[in-house]
Image (cartoon, coloured by chain):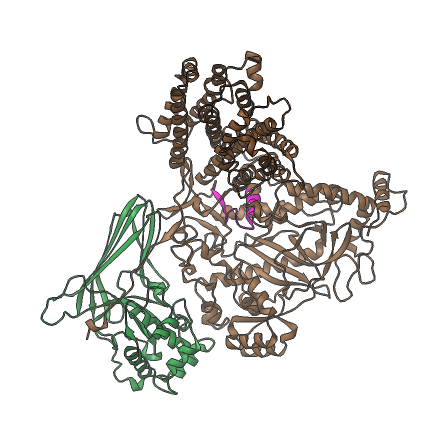
Chain colours: A brown, B green
């Protein structure tokens, strides 16, 4: 526990010249180790271990207060960067920021070298096992492995067999979870071969912590991660058989609703690859293609994130038709490389851990350098006896696991009554393994201003490189609370740490950016915009404008309600109320009666309506939609824009007690934030297709909203009074322009000109249409038939119609009570804008929808027919 | 016997299908007693390419895709097949005792080829269970020769189970078949396989055709035949012996094999994935005609 007094002392020390000041309070005061565990920081006698001494000295110089201050700053960055683990596509799911701890794990270079040699050896063995099981199967034929380990394995699909993966490796990428036993020895707790998660988080942890503690990071000679990622990229490039020079490599993610999406997006961005989902890919002519706005582009390598069995619905007959139909056939034709190859998850099942010492001996003639935790496969009678005899000291696990399903099921097993579990094992012994339950080491974790011990598991990563493997120095350290008992060794989630491998001498600075000698081809497009991304961008644009229009309309309405200068008539609020109902912001019922009957009710109901997440037209719902669309294209949004979005999501929440004034100030903030996003788009986005679709979405929605406003105020109500006209100008953000032209003289023709036909006013309908026309002309389309396409015809006819409006004539008719001309103009603009949206979607955005399976005929041969 | 077989499957969709990918098991494989002289696969609309692959079991698989919008799909497989009677298993008392085979399949390394062992493991449509083992045990009495025991099981399924196409569908599981004592050829095959596997024996699913005799006095209706399914049992040195529980026979020259696998899922005649399409309707016609 650090008191206030100590904290302030810490700050002053950090700022002073360090050497002459007495030692400030320690960050590790009160850090209690457990005698039965290995502690990473302290010897059993309480003295810091050699590896940590320098780092600890530097921390002491800094003091807890400065440490806390820096950490507070970093945490804000983590939140604003949207660093999260759970599904963040949906804000209602309460995306939980990745629980990073600022104190890194320290490992000495000498110790890590031993670990990495062991990991490389293990990866080598597992690679050979995979290559054999998916190929000649000698290991089973010769009895090194029981047949059951292959054919009784729920994760083995026949279709995996017979692949010839490029570069002849079945395991380009491997991860192992490590734990340290009380005697200081490192053990492998689990192997990960399907599609190991975590390198993106390891990278992000490194970025955050090294920024927080740059001085220590340098002083401790921490080995860099970049060389690993360079090897990673080189390995992926080796998988490209047809385009070895400049292959198109994509990160094939499970999508924004999956917990690892952030990591996938982060990794794709860092490595410089496109992030794609199954729907973005198609197989034609036994090749894999990326569907983009510019047509199909061939993909050479997939960094696969979904499980193998979810990758090709044609080959794997699970009920869901997920994946890319025909992918495996493309693999067989060797037109695409996949890391890891389909089926690589086979050997991450715990059953293989029981055989690995024997396999290593058989395949390499060596002993395992890095032992796995002792595991017994119950399918062998001797092992079964041993597991049953020592049941209480062991963890029982499913012998076969499919990535993502093992944890919950293993947890259930170990929650069963011992007798029940025993019976279950005996019914089908081959389905279970018994595993030693190790006491994990502890490591300090920064928790509420003090360091406390936490259980440690380290996930380390290896990528194939030449004949062997390149191991990431460090990896992803994960912590769990030692006071919460968990029968399973490896936590499913919990805290995470950066892991520093300390070199004895200064380390070279390596960057992933291309070497200066490589010649870059100057280009002005990013290429590769998947249609799905364009679709989401388009909707994001629409939703930003929709939220903006709703907020402005609501603001003006509240101002009218609460204004003292109001003339006392309720014509204007009545009109605006109908406009709000038309936007779906309030129930239509409110707009039916005379406004004065509704007022008291409205004043109390309005604040809640604004924040009602269940009312589709409520501003909060619109913001949720906007945020959701933004999450789906997170990788296309600049960090600054994303920060504003996160800020909006956080700031626009219903306060405890709300009255209309609070709502008003929140609306003011929101309108300013939305303007900031729009400004960011205009000023910081290159004029690519991404910008184009965002702009088309925005312009289309703004035009629709302005048409809607004119319709509500002028057609649905008779709005030709100066108060309504002023409110319209206010909502359309055109008051300043109007005053500069006409002073306070409010007249319908001038207002209509400004909001409808003036192409120089960026808020007018005419301006939106002209911009739309310009953007639409830039849309891709090589195979343009003669004449105009439907969406081109629509925009042309609207531009034309608005340019031809005779404002004075329309207003004269309006004044004598004939609203028909204006009404039909508004009606046709509204219809055509909706049609335009649909036509653009049909041509560029709609992806074909989910895959389905063909029905199959039942066999119903009548035995009576045959004798 | 020589047969000409025509197997047509037609799909019609209420909405356009922009793309579909297909994988079909329709080419009769070569077996000890069977050769396939001619095979043609006609797909309308015509795909750019039809590729022939060989699956894990050695069956032929044809792959094709349609990447232009279509509202219907017709797949016709025509083949000419010679079938001759093979191993004479009538003298079934000389076949090995079934327990010996179970031991051989279980030992390490196995005394059978590992791809024979594969069929002793449960699969999606033919899982193991105690109930199934108990049912099978009535036929598989101690030390009984495998062929004799399997024939007995075949006869029991034929007698005790009612043939009823309405009782089941393509996804029916064996426990339902056992509970209802009803089903079609596919169900009886799966049931028999699951019974044998529950004892530790190896059994596989055979997909094929059956020549149907016309009703006496009337000419045979073209296209009235159907796909058929039965099972095959690993009998040690005798190799694999087929049993047809739907008709209570050991297949000889009336049965034409397309291919075999662990169950229906491995040799499903037509598998496909498509997009769009609205409602789909399916019609199948099969004709098996002897050639003079």
Looking at the rendering, which quadrant does residue A82 occupy?
top right
Tell me which corner region of the image, top left, top right, bottom left or bottom right, holds residue A846: top left
Residue at image location 61% in from the left, 27% down from the top: A559
A297 within the magenta span = no
Vertical comparison of B238 with A805: above or below: below
Q: Nearer the viewer, residue A767 or A486?
A: A767
Residue A257 falls inside the magenta stretch:
yes
Residue A207 can be seen in this image: yes
**Residue drawn at x 53%, y 59% as measured from the top left:** A403
Image quarter of the N terminus of chain B: bottom left
Residue for point 46% across, 50% down:
A337
In-front residue for pair A300/A408? A408
**The furthest residue to the left:** B217
Picture coordinates of residue A348, whole percent (x, y): 54, 62
Residue at the location (75% across, 42% down)? Answer: A70
- Across the whole image, how many numbered discs are drawn on residues? 0
In this view, the residue in front, B57 or A155, is A155
Q: Which residues are magenta?
A: A248-268
Horizontal and vertical percent position of residue A301: 47, 47
Q: Is residue A587 above or below residue A771?
A: below
């Amino acid at each position: 526990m650090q008191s206030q007094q100590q904290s302030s002392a810490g700050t002053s020390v950090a700022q002073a010249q360090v050497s002459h000041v007495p030692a400030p309070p320690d960050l590790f005061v009160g850090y209690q180790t457990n005698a039965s565990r290995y502690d990473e920081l302290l010897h059993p006698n309480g003295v810091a271990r050699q590896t940590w001494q320098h780092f600890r000295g530097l921390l002491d110089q800094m003091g807890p207060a400065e440490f806390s201050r820096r950490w507070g700053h970093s945490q804000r960055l983590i939140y604003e960067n949207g660093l999260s683990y759970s599904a963040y596509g949906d804000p209602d799911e309460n995306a939980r920021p990745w629980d990073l701890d600022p104190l890194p794990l320290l490992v000495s270079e000498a110790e890590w070298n031993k670990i990495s040699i062991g990991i490389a050896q293990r990866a080598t063995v597992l690679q050979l096992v995979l290559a054999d099981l998916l190929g000649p199967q000698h290991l089973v034929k010769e009895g090194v492995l029981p047949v059951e380990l292959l054919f009784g394995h729920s994760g083995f699909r026949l279709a995996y067999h017979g692949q010839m993966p490029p570069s002849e490796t079945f395991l380009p990428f491997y991860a192992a979870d490590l734990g340290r036993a009380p005697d200081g020895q490192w053990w492998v707790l689990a192997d990960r071969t399907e599609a190991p998660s975590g390198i993106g988080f390891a990278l992000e942890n490194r970025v955050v912590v090294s920024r927080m503690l740059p001085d220590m990071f340098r002083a401790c000679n921490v080995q860099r991660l970049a060389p690993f990622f360079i090897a990673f990229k080189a390995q992926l490039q080796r998988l490209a058989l047809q385009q070895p020079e400049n292959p198109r490599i994509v990160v094939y993610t499970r999508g924004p609703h999956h917990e690892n999406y952030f990591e996938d997006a982060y990794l794709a961005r860092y490595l410089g690859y496109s992030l794609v989902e199954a729907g973005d890919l198609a197989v034609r002519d036994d090749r894999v293609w990326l569907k983009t706005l510019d047509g199909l582009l061939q993909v050479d390598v997939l960094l696969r994130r979904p499980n193998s069995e979810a990758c090709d619905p044609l080959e794997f007959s699970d009920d869901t038709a997920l994946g890319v139909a025909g992918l495996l056939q493309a693999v067989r034709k060797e037109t695409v490389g996949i890391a890891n190859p389909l089926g690589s998850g086979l050997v991450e099942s715990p059953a293989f851990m029981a055989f690995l010492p024997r396999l290593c001996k058989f395949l390499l003639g060596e002993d395992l350098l890095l032992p796995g935790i002792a595991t017994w496969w119950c399918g062998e009678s001797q092992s079964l006896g041993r597991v049953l005899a020592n049941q209480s000291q062991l963890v029982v696990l499913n012998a076969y696991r499919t990535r993502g399903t093992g944890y919950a099921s293993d947890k259930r097993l170990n929650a069963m009554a011992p007798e029940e579990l025993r019976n279950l094992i005996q019914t089908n012994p081959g389905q279970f393994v018994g595993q030693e339950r190790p006491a994990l080491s502890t490591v300090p974790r920064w928790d509420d201003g003090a360091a406390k011990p936490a259980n440690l598991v380290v996930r380390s990563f290896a990528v194939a490189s030449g004949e062997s493997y390149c191991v990431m120095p460090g990896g992803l350290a994960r912590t769990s609370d030692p006071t919460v008992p968990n029968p399973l060794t490896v936590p499913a989630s919990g805290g995470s740490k950066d892991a520093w491998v300390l070199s004895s001498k200064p380390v070279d600075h390596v960057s992933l950016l291309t070497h200066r000698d490589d010649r870059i081809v100057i280009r002005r497009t990013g290429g590769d915009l998947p249609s799905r991304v364009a679709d989401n961008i388009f909707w994001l644009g629409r939703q930003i404008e929709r939220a903006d229009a709703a907020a402005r309309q609501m603001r003006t309405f509240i101002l009218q309600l609460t204004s003292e200068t109001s003339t006392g008539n309720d014509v204007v609020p009545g009109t605006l109320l109908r406009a709000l109902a038309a936007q779906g912001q309030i129930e239509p019922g409110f707009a039916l009666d005379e406004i004065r009957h509704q007022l008291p009710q409205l004043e109390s109901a309005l604040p809640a309506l604004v924040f009602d997440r269940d009312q589709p037209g409520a501003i909060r719902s619109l913001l949720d939609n906007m945020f959701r669309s933004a999450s789906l294209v997170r990788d296309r949004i600049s960090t600054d824009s994303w920060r504003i979005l996160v800020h909006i999501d956080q700031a626009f929440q219903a306060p405890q007690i709300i009255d209309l004034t609070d709502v008003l100030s929140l609306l003011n903030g929101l309108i300013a934030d939305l303007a900031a996003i729009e400004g960011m788009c205009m000023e910081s986005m290159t004029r690519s297709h991404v910008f184009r679709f965002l702009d088309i979405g925005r312009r289309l929605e703004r035009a629709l909203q302005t048409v809607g406003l004119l319709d509500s105020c002028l057609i649905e109500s008779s709005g030709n009074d100066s108060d309504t006209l002023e409110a319209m100008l206010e909502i359309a953000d055109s008051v300043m322009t109007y005053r500069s032209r006409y002073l306070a003289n409010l007249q319908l023709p001038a207002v209509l000109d400004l909001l409808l036909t003036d192409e120089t006013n960026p808020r007018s309908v005419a301006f939106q249409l002209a911009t739309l026309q310009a953007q639409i002309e830039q849309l891709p389309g090589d195979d343009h038939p003669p004449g105009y396409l439907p969406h081109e015809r629509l925009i042309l006819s609207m531009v034309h119609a608005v340019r031809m409006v005779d404002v004075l004539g329309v207003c004269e008719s309006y004044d004598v009570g004939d609203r028909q001309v204006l009404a039909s103009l508004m009606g046709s603009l509204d219809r055509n804008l909706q049609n335009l949206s649909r036509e653009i979607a049909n041509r560029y955005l709609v992806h074909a929808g989910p895959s389905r399976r063909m029905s199959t005929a039942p066999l119903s041969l009548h035995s009576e027919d045959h004798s | 016997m020589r047969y000409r077989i025509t197997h047509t499957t037609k799909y019609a969709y209420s909405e356009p299908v922009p793309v579909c990918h297909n994988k079909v098991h329709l080419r009769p494989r070569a077996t000890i007693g069977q050769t396939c002289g001619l095979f043609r696969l006609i797909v309308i609309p015509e795909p750019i390419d039809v590729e022939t692959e060989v699956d894990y079991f050695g069956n032929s698989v044809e792959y094709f895709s349609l990447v232009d919008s279509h509202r219907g799909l017709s797949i016709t497989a025509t083949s000419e097949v010679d079938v001759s009677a093979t191993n004479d298993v009538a003298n079934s008392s000389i076949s090995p005792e079934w327990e010996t085979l179970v031991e051989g399949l279980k030992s390490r390394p196995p005394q059978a080829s590992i791809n024979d062992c594969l069929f002793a493991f449960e699969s999606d449509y033919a899982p193991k269970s105690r109930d199934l083992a108990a049912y099978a045990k009535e036929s598989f009495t101690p030390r009984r020769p495998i062929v004799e025991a399997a024939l007995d099981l075949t006869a029991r399924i034929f007698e005790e189970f009612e043939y009823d196409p309405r009782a089941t569908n393509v996804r029916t599981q064996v426990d339902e078949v056992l509970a209802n004592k009803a089903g079609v050829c596919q169900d009886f095959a799966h049931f028999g396989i699951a019974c044998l596997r529950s004892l530790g024996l190896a059994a596989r699913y055979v997909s094929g055709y059956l020549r149907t005799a016309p009703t006496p006095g009337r000419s045979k209706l073209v296209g009235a035949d159907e796909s058929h399914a039965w099972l095959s049992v690993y009998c040690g040195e005798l190799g694999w012996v087929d049993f047809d529980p739907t008709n209570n026979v050991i297949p000889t020259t009336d049965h034409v094999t397309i291919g075999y696998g662990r169950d229906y899922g491995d040799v499903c005649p037509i598998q496909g994935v498509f997009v769009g399409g609205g409602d789909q309707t399916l019609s199948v016609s099969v004709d098996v005609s002897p050639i003079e």
